[in-house]
Amino acid sequence: MSMLGNNPDRSVKFGNRWELVPVPFFSVYPLLYESCALSNQTMAEDKPWALISEVGEQGFIEEVTDIIKQHFNIICLRDFLQNPQQHGPKIQAILMWNTFPAAEPSLLSSLPSLKVVANGGVGIDHLDVPYITSLGVKVANTPGVVSVATADMAMGLLLASARKIVEGHQIAVDPKTTSIPQSLVGVEVTGSTLGIIGMGHIGYKIAQRSKGFDMKILYHNRHRRSVEDEQSVGASYCENMDDLLREADFVVLVVNLSPETKGLISHRELSLMKPTATLVNVSRGLVVDQDALVKALQSGEIRAAALDVTHPEPLPRDHPLLSLPNVLITPHVGTYTYATIKRTVQCMVDNAVAAVNGLPVPNEVKLK
Ligand SMILES: O=C(O)[C@H](O)CO
């Protein structure tokens, strides 16, 4: 049985460095590994054991692992896999990021004492929650703590794409540059229309930021926000997503990946967008039909795309999205600030500690 939840074709390949490691969790990209060998820590008899990913070499890493070590003895996947029979019975918690394949059935079957899979980040599309919970294991995520960093990233992508900041940097540092090419002329953000698809925590934070840019804000969401929420950011609800797509200069995707949102933006939706519009995605790659996106960008059906997420991650090096001039891509680093990483790890630890102690888990993901 697959553990890949709502995302059956997600290719979490063991041994693929990028996908194995929880990229935003411990290290900067590209990652350098260092085994968190058991000898690196003082083992406390009274602390439960947690299985985590490998640890990188950068300075803040120890700081982050220290948050975990206050409550858990930790063992890294790499060390664990050397002798699962020996280590398996003591593991009570898995602390993982969404790129960490630690919740595969074969691994879970070697963890008879496991009480919780504590995910860092809000998206849990990589987990088969029904299967994990059927084992009596709780699943938790970290909503809220990732919102500001992800909203900042969405605004950063939007601005960078609109104002061609990356291209501008390349021109500025190129020794051959003698003049400013017209291709650097961008589109104005202030006063433009923003369409937010998915008005949860992160979507709302994006709306708050956009208000500072005097943007007209439209949003589409499963549930309409309260009048107070709408008024305080000046957002208008579009019950029909098509209306938003037709009107927005920037469409930002902030939905969770689910069977309902997989392929939400495909040929039809892209064709409704303005030829001057930009698509920004900080949710999950599978929310967008990437083949349709490539066509829309190549044909000028939309102006540009700015993506912090793709499917798969990373894209194959010869993927057309990587060579289109109107695409800006970052490697799924929306939550990737020191402050957010620390808050996220603290939240994961709080969830895991509660589960291990049989207490209510603050951010338990419950089956609907
Ligand atoms: O789900 C999230 O919160 C981010 O994408 C980090 O994984």
Image: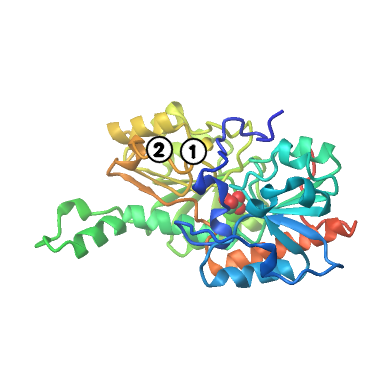
Judged left or right of residue 171, residue 281 is right
Residue kind at label 2, given as amino acid type? Pro
Q: In the rendered structure, which amino acid carries the disc numbered 1?
A: Pro
Quarter of the picture containing the N terminus is top right
Residue 130 lies, in percent from the top left, at 78, 36
Marks 1 and 2, how far apart at CA = 8 Å
Q: Which mark is residue 107?
A: none
Cβ at disc 1 under 8 Å from ligand 1: no
314 above or below 203?
above
Q: Nearer the viewer, residue 60 or 77?
A: 77
Q: Quadrant of the C terminus?
A: top right
Looking at the image, the residue that sits furthest to the left is 178
Q: Which residue is mark 2?
A: 316
Could you say where residue 174 lies in the image, as x and y percent from the top left?
Answer: 17, 61
To which residue does mark 1 refer? 312
- Indicate left or right for 279 with 130 as reference: left
Q: Residues within 10 Å of mark 1 (few under 14, many from 20)?
A: some
Picture coordinates of residue 311, whole percent (x, y) = 49, 38
